Amino acid sequence: MKLSDVFVGKELFVGCPNKAGVYVEPVAIGIGPTRIRGSAYIEGPILTGDPTSFAMPEANLMVGRCQNIEAGGPLIPPSIFKVSSRANDPTPIDVMLGDPTGPVGIAVHGLLVNSIVDTYSLHVCPTNIVLGTIFHTGIEELVGTKLLIGAEVIKKVASAVSSEFRVGSKTYVDLMLQIGAILTKGWTHADGAVCQAGHVLSLKKTSPFDMPHPNKKGWRLRHVCIEGPEIAVYCRGRVSGNGVIDLPSYWDGLVNTEDMTINLTPIGSWQELYVKEIQWGKKVIVRNNAGGPINADYHITGRRLDDDLIVEYEGESHTDYPGVDGKGNEGYDFSFENDNMERLVKEVVRERLDERGDK
């Protein structure tokens, strides 16, 4: 029987509602006087769209591309599947796949997946495993363990609470804020500021340079940085023969050659070494007062021309640093408290959102 139009005023049943061959009332759409007008039960499987997209009952609901020429397909086919809240306010449960009492497995195989979230996206997962390259534009907030194998490029702000395990490279081109441990096996590059709760160079006991020992199996080597009240650079090497030390060419315009400390260590025998002069800020002339040959190691430290460091200043945090016109060597607050990091995260997020609004 063929019908041009069919109107069902109450409920539509196709097939028999059952579970494992036993009849079951479809209580979700109402029974008897509680029946919901316009509801339908279809036993399935259901096939809609291109009938050649499926060769067997691969799913209870199989949706292929529209082939109806009255709807534009196949020359200008509409979307295969679309959900819209147009003319209505969106809600957090507009689209649901599974729920806390009925989780489902999800498999996605797509040539290109685009996700645009206007306000906020929350992803809660004990373990994330991603193979390939991820590009993030915006703010990503993760709670739990994240395992990535491959490269990740982040162009905005990333904030993380908990640990991160990484195999491969990770590139930041803006700002990364981290509360918790970062374990990296591979190369990490940050083209911008990287902040954490405490300065990595000031926490000598908890944030040193740690590496496998180069010549003692089963041992490790741990170093920490020295600190000083100036912005300085150094060079070292050996001087012999004519006693001339050529300073690095890039020191010209970088180092105040009138404010250098030059240490000389004689090699092989005692030598009465001294610095005779510094020529044009490019050469250090060393002489032996006893007239003998020169053979020594040297270590030269020079203050940079742009050294405007204010070592001690009055204030409660790094934001009180006077600097140059209130800017420059701000540094970081060495607080171990997470409330300071929370404040930093809020400030950065607010600043980035303001920049986005200006555009």
Image: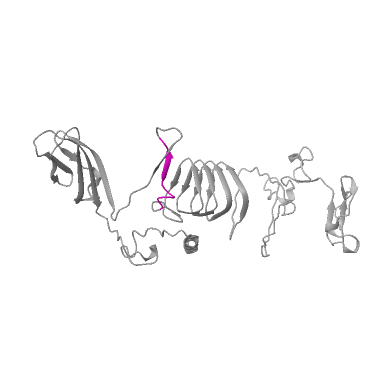
* 267, 40: nearer the viewer: 267
The answer to whether 155 appears left or right of 268 in the picture is right
**Residue found 49% across the figure and 43% down from its top:** 184
Estimate the x, y position of residue 316 in percent, counting from the top left.
Answer: 39, 66
Indicate the quadrant where residue 99 lies. Answer: bottom right
Indicate the quadrant where residue 317 lies. Answer: bottom left
**Residue found 27% across the figure and 56% down from its top:** 307
Query: In the rendered view, would you say 9 is above or below 219?
Result: below
Query: In the rendered view, would you say 339 is above or below 296?
Result: below
Which residues are the magenta region?
203-213
Q: Is residue 206 magenta?
A: yes
Which secondary structure type mostly characterizes the magenta part of the structure?
loop
Q: Is residue 30 magenta?
A: no
Query: In the rendered view, would you say 336 is above or below 80?
Result: below
Estimate the x, y position of residue 141 in percent, counting from the top left.
Answer: 56, 55
**Residue found 49% across the figure and 60% down from its top:** 338
The answer to whether 293 appears left or right of 232 in the picture is left
* 119, 176: nearer the viewer: 176
